[in-house]
Each structure stands twice: as structure tokens, then as C-alpha cells.
Image (cartoon, grey):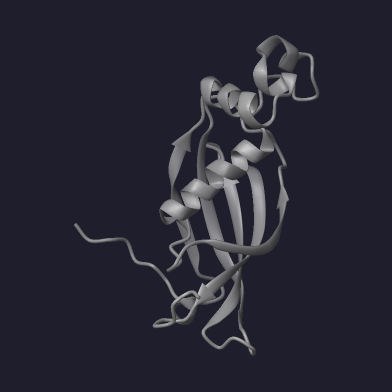
Amino acid sequence: MTSPPSFHLDDLAVGQTFTSASHTVDADQIKAYARQFDPQPFHLDEAAAEASYFRGLAASGWHTASITMRLLVEGGAPIANGVIGAGGEIAWPRPTRPGDVLTVVSEITDIRASRSRPERGIVTIRSETRNQNGEPVQILTAKLVVWRRGAAPA
């Protein structure tokens, strides 16, 4: 079995896209994540969630971000030497719900070789985490540190 391709700075181009595998979210996952990291009633209890802004059980935005990261690392952003963030912006235009099937679609929007560190550069990637209806539940614009082929992270 061959490994999926992994890309170095010189392999990437503005406009290049990647699509991740999918992940199905269920109520148990939402509640388990919330109990540990974001224990708010609309993430933990269906009745409380119905009476909230979300009008139903909703995953924490950070849970959605964690799922996104896993999908990116497992092939949705096949960057050699890892998906290493150097900053970014995140938005959650709609909640992630039980039963949602999430997929991440990413596009390279900018590539900048470093002048001071020629072995690497910064790649800007816009990743939409979409539900089964193609609706974005998260939009992440991230700056990633990406090495050139033959250069190892120090």
C-alpha cells in the first residue's frame, strides 16, 4: 500500500484544492467533548439546547475545529512535515449538529517563500468544513509553515 502524497512548498500552487475524508458527528461525541472542554448547556443537554440560541444540540465550535484538524492531518491538507499553524482566522456560520457528516474542502490562496529562512515559507489555506448538505459549518483561513523539499524542520 502506498502512502498518500505529501506536498512541500515547491509542490504547491495558488488555486490548488484538497478534499478530506468525512467524519460523522453524533450526540455522544458532542456531549463528551463538551463535558471535557466546553461544558455549556447547549452542548450537553437536548432540552437546554432547545431553549437556547441554537434551538437544538450543537457541537462546540472548538469541537468542530478539532474534527477539522484531524481531517486535515489525515489527508485533507497533505503537507509534508505536518500541518503547522502560524496564525489564522476562524468563523462558524452555522452549528454542527448530531448526524452531520463533515468534510473539509481546502484551497491554497497564497504562497510566500521566506526571505530570512530559505528552507521554508508560509502558505495560506482557506478550509471550509461542510456538512452533508454542502453548507459551511466552519471557515478557517490559516497560515501554515511549509518546508521546501529536502529541508528538514529544525
**Which residue is rendered at x = 64% and y = 90% of the image?**
115
Note whether 134 is above or below 118 in the view shown: above
Q: Nearer the viewer, residue 154 or 110?
A: 154
Residue 135 seen from this side: no
From the viewer's perspective, tell me whether residue 103 is left or right of residue 139. Answer: left
Image label count: 0
Residue 65 picture quarter: top right
Name, please, the residue furthest toward the left: 1
Q: Nearer the viewer, residue 74 or 38?
A: 38
Note whether 79 is above or below 135 in the view shown: below
Q: Nearer the viewer, residue 130 or 149?
A: 149
**Which residue is rendered at x = 47% and y = 63% of the image?**
82
Residue 49 seen from this side: yes
**Which residue is rendered at x = 68% and y = 38% of the image?**
61
Which percent across, then down, holds residue 77?
A: 48, 60
Residue 45 picture quarter: top right
Which percent across, then down, holds residue 57?
A: 66, 21
Which percent across, then down, holds residue 2?
A: 22, 61
Name, please, the residue furthest toward the front: 154
Quarter of the image where the N terminus is located: bottom left
Note whether 11 is above or below 86 in the view shown: below
**Which residue is rendered at x = 67% and y = 23% of the image?**
43
Which percent across, then down, holds residue 114?
A: 62, 85
Note whether 56 is above or below 25 in the view shown: above
